[in-house]
């Protein structure tokens, strides 16, 4: 494992995915003391999955929207991820989702997968990115959201978040020691 040429750049990435759908989280609500606020909503089951890999040291990111979280879609993500910078060797740190550890997963030659310990989502820095994205969506949530307008809002978030912000969110101290 590893690059065959010592001059090949080695890049450390952290990866995760989140479901984006019309059933958005509800922010804080004002109500009388001791009463639970009531919000009537009809369940809406339209969604897609947003995959992301972030390089914590510099804030570089690779994003891909896919219809599901399964082995097939994860394989598509890996192939596109490996192809976006074929001259580098990529170490991809990820959780133990069933799609990540399936036998059918075959990473490209320039990508190696490193799994975090089971049941430790707090070790994955991309989880903080998802918190920021969900907060961003909650602040902009309207009853008129459609899946297309939701995609546009997520695209705006992706286009406007800076590499400095991504590095600030994801550069965990334990990763700094590795690099």
Image (cartoon, rainbow, N blue to C red):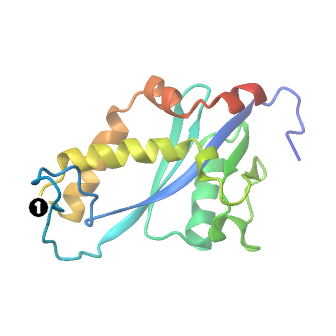
Of residues 22 and 147, the one nearer the viewer is 22
- Residue at 59 percent of width and 47 percent of height: 122
51 w.r.t. 166: above or below: below
Relative horizontal placement of residue 101, taking residue 15 as reference (left or right): right
Q: Is residue 152 left or right of residue 6?
A: left
Most extreme residue toward the front is 34
On the image, which quarter does residue 57 sit in? top right
Q: Is residue 38 above or below residue 6?
A: below
Residue 169: x and y, percent? 49, 32
Q: Residue at 59% across / 29% down in the picture?
A: 171
Q: Is residue 168 left or right of residue 176?
A: left
Q: Residue shown at 80%/31% (left/top)? A: 8
Q: Quadrant of residue 60?
A: top right
Q: Secondary structure at mark 1?
A: loop
Residue with the mark numbered 1: 143
- Residue 155's spot in the image, x, y percent? 31, 46
Left or right, 52 with respect to 19, comes to right
Which quarter of the figure is the C terminus placed in? top right
Where does the image place residue 141, in percent across and percent down from the top left? Answer: 18, 53
Where is residue 4, by image quadrant? top right
| In this view, 171 is above or below 75 | above
The percent position of residue 72, horizontal first and vertical second, equals: 59, 72
């Amino acid at each position: 494992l590893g690059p065959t040429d010592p001059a090949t750049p080695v890049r450390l990435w952290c990866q995760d995915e989140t479901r984006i759908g019309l059933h958005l989280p509800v922010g804080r609500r004002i109500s009388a003391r001791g009463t639970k606020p009531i919000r009537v909503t009809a369940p809406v089951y339209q969604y897609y999955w947003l995959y992301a890999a972030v390089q914590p040291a510099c804030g570089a990111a690779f994003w891909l929207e896919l219809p599901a979280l399964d082995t097939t879609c994860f394989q598509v993500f890996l192939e596109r991820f490996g192809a976006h910078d074929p001259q580098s060797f990529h170490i991809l740190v990820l959780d133990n989702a069933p799609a990540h550890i399936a036998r059918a997963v075959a990473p490209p030659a320039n990508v190696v997968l490193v799994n975090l310990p089971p049941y430790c989502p707090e070790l994955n820095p991309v989880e903080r990115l998802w918190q920021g994205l969900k907060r961003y969506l909650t602040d902009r949530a309207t009853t008129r959201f459609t899946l297309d307008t939701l995609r546009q809002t997520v695209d705006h978030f992706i286009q406007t978040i800076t590499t400095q912000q991504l590095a600030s969110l994801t550069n965990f101290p334990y990763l700094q020691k590795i690099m």
